[in-house]
Structure formats: structure tokens, C-alpha cells
Image (cartoon, grey):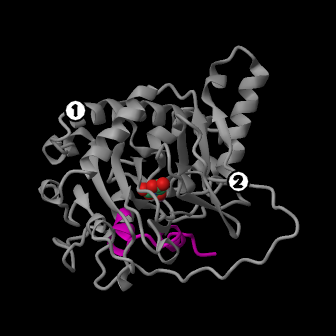
Amino acid sequence: MNCVQSWPEPIVRVQSLSDSGIRVIPERYIKRHSPKPSLKLTTPVRELTIPVIDLENLASRDIALRANTLALISRACREWGFFQVVNHGVSHQVMDQVREVWREFFHLPVDEKQVYANSPTTYEGYGSRLGVEKGAKLDWSDYYFLNYLPTCQRNEHKWPSYPSSCKEIVSEYNEALVKLCGELMKILSINLGLEENRLQQALGGDEVGASLRVNYYPKCPQPDLTFGLSPHSDPGALTILLADNQVSGLQVRKDDNWVTVKPVPNAFIVNIGDQVEVLSNGNYKSVEHRVVVNSAAERVSLAFFYNPKGDKTIEPAEELITPTVPPQYLPMTFNEYRTFIRTRGPCGKTSVESIKSPR
Ligand code: OGA
Ligand code: NI
């Protein structure tokens, strides 16, 4: 594991920068240059959107509807790596409550949040950077990271005690998402032609990992020069994102375009992580995504990461290996794999690229 004990430079809270009223962002956050004024398009481009799937259809008596829904999910996993789900069984009230609890946390005075300041050893707590390289460019966001599974890594003392309902609501929310992830792993297994528990077993069965990262993107005076979160793919197996209910910002890569996701009310955004790309031997893609910020409004999102058991070796499922399709990725444990992003920060798809089998 990565043994770095502390951040290479003093931590600056992006929220404090934003609140200070600066008009020009510090150099460290400048990651791109203002886009050139776009050419006037003469023909309107059809707007691309990620697929929206009604999960209730999978319980329908209508066989054709069930099959069609499975097929839609299969296509989404191959072609987008992303989809939204509605009628997913998670209480809308809990979804609203958990988002608001975290909004309230981030609105606390800095001193009160500072008690939970995190370090790169576990990342647990209140943080403002990903990666430990000295002098690295930074993203325009603060976050809160906590471990949920395995239970031996759950430490509620490291969760905020204010708002007072935080621990209870976060537990209720996380429990519901563990269940949803379990169901989605079955669907993905079936769609890959595997036995329904296959992916879950490969991740470690009852010993899977899960963590929550709450992202806080403050208003930014020069949004075109930076990212809320730089392009990356998620290192785990599956991510369930609860987006802000008012402000969009997530963009998903589709070929050479960045497609802005318009969250459907009460939906979750689901995306394939690197470990499912590996297990599926590349049939499913862990797709690059990024977050853009804006000058008018802050944004809060909750990313729930469903991960393999830390010391489980992840490699392409043997059922998906044929004489013409050899394994596309090298085996690696998740503990090892995770050090890529924890050391270097978000860097596109470089982690997955580095474990591609040599041809
Ligand atoms: C992430 C992520 C997207 C968002 O936390 O990995 O991609 O919209 N978040 O905040
Ligand atoms: Ni992500």
C-alpha cells in the first residue's frame, strides 16, 4: 500500500477560495484554456443522452418487456458504460434527506469541518485533493470520503456528528445502495452470459467493499479554466451517483465528445468501474467522465463505490476467454490497483491502460 502519511503541501479548502470572492482562480487550478468561440453550426446536432432504464420492468410478467430491459442495460454497458435507473426501489425521501444532510455539513463553518480533515493514508474524512504529487494541478472541489464495507473498516467516529441525523441517514442510504448494487451485479452477470452470482463472487461475495464520496463543488469565478473533477474512470466495480437535484455538471465521454448528463428526478446514475471492465474482459467499458463547474451555483453529488474485497485478485472471467479472445488485462488486487488514483489523482484511463495485457 501507499505509505504516504501526509499531504505534500498545506491543504486549501476550495470552498474558502470560493467564499473569499476572488475573481481570478489560482494557477494551481488552471487545467485548461478558455474554449475558442465555437463555429456556428448550420445543422443542429441531435443531443446525445445516456440511456434511462426503468428497473421495475425487470419484475414485469411481460417476458418481452423483461428481455427488452435486459437488452437495454446490456447495450448501455457496452456502448456508454453509463445509464440512469428509475424505479430502483430506494426511497426518494432518503435520497433527498441524504443530499440535504451533506449540503448542511458543507455549509458548516470551516473550523467545524476541519476536525475531520483527512490524510492520504486512508482518505477518510474531509478532503480537498486526490493524489499526493507535489505541485500537481488541483480540481475545484472539496469532498468527504467514508468507508462502509467491509464492516471492520467502518468507523462512525470518522463520520460527521453534525448534522445530528447524518450517521443514521447515511447508514440507511448506504444499506439501500449495497442492496441495489447486489441486484445490478446479478443483472450484469446474466447479461454477460454468466451464472447470476458470478460477478459478486468474483468481487469477494459477502466481503465486498463499499465507500461513499460526497463531492462539493463550490461556485467558480472562472469555470472554463478548471474542472470540478478531472477526466477519470472509477477504479472500483460499480458506482452509483446521486447527482445534485438542481445543478448539472457531470459529463461522460462518448467517442470524442463530452456529453452532459441531465439527471432525471429521483434517478441514480450508474457507471461501470475499472474492475467490471476487467472481469468482463473488456466487454463492458469503464468510461471516462469529468465534472465541470459554474459561476452561478454550487453543486453536491454523492458517489457510492462498490468495490472488490481489497486482497481479492481481479482478472478476466475465464468463461469470457476463448481461443480468439485471450485475457485482455493482467491480474491485480484492488488494494494494489487503488494506489494508482490515490497517488496520481484523476488521470483519464491511464490506470486501466497500465494493466492491459501485452499483445
Ligand atoms: C466521482 C465522480 C461525478 C459527479 O466522484 O468519481 O465521477 O458528478 N463524480 O460528482
Ligand atoms: Ni467518477
Residue at the (56%, 70%) spot, across then down: 356
Residue at the (76%, 31%) spot, across then down: 68
Residue, far right: 43
Decide whether residue 341 is among the magenta residues.
yes
Q: Name the residue under label 1.
A: 165
Q: In the rendered structure, which amino acid carries the disc numbered 2? A: Glu
Residue at the (39%, 48%) spot, across then down: 308
Q: In the rendered structure, which amino acid carries the disc numbered 1? A: Ser
- Element class at badge 2: helix
Contact between marks 2 and 1 (CB within 8 A): the answer is no
Residue 24: x, y in percent?
Answer: 39, 81
Q: Which quarter of the rendering shows the N terminus?
A: bottom left
Ligand 1 quadrant assignment: bottom left
Residue 148: x, y in percent?
Answer: 28, 42
Decide whether residue 256 is among the magenta residues.
no
Q: What stretch is highlighted in magenta?
A: 338-359
Q: Which quarter of the rendering shows the C terminus?
A: bottom right
Q: Is residue 216 left or right of residue 71?
A: left
Q: Earlier in the sequence, mark 2 or mark 1?
A: 2
Q: Name the residue under label 2.
A: 79
Quadrant of the image occupied by residue 314: bottom left
| Of labels 2 and 1, the one closer to you | 1
Mark 1 Cα shell of 10 Å, populated few (<14), some (14-19), many (≥20): few
- 55 and 93: which is toward the camera: 93
